[in-house]
Amino acid sequence: MKVTLIDTHTHLDFADFDADRAQVLDNCLALGVQRMVVLGVYQRNWQRLGELTEANPSLYAAFGMHPVYIDEHRTAHLNELGDWLTRLQRHPQLCAVGEIGLDYYVEQPDRARQQALFDAQLQLASDFNLPALLHVRRSHADVIATLKRHRPK
């Protein structure tokens, strides 16, 4: 029996991979990783994420706003996220909204802003019938409570 390997959590859109991204992708494919999900974490990389997945059929995109980067996120970015999801909603390589969630590990987390952002992105995932890829660090109870509120009726 042949096992299909899928890396469900990569950040290949980060500039850290600019020098060797092609080699990393080749190595993954050579080792049997057939698909990889690239999770968007902030608005400034969404264009790169879109271009990267468009250029490589083994990559799948998830667009989102990570709670660790809360200070970078703006209200307008939620509208822009909705625009990206609208444009790509029928694209076979759009696979989720993510990486989203709550992170209480960071020093003095702005829990209210994180929660509002998490709620809004879960609503987008629901609106577009997409899975949500979660980031949960020291926030399990609040994430579970949030997911219960967003559970389909």
Image: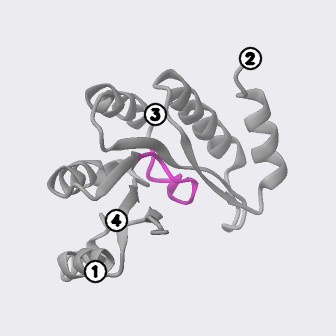
Question: Magenta part mainly helix, strand or loop?
Answer: loop
Q: Name the amino acid, label 4.
A: Gln
Q: Is residue 53 above or below residue 145?
A: below
Q: Residue at x 35, y 47 (%)?
A: 43
On whether residue 137 falls in the magenta region, the answer is: no
On whether residue 68 falls in the magenta region, the answer is: yes
Is 110 placed left or right of 29 in the picture? Answer: right
Segment colored magenta:
63-73
The label nearer to you, 2 versus 4, is 4
Q: Which mark is residue 30?
A: 1
Disc 1 from disc 2: Cα separation: 43 Å
- Residue position for label 4: 34
Disc 1 from disc 4: Cα separation: 9 Å
Where disc 2 sits, the SS reads: loop
Q: Earlier in the sequence, mark 2 or mark 4?
A: 4
Disc 2 from disc 3: Cα separation: 28 Å
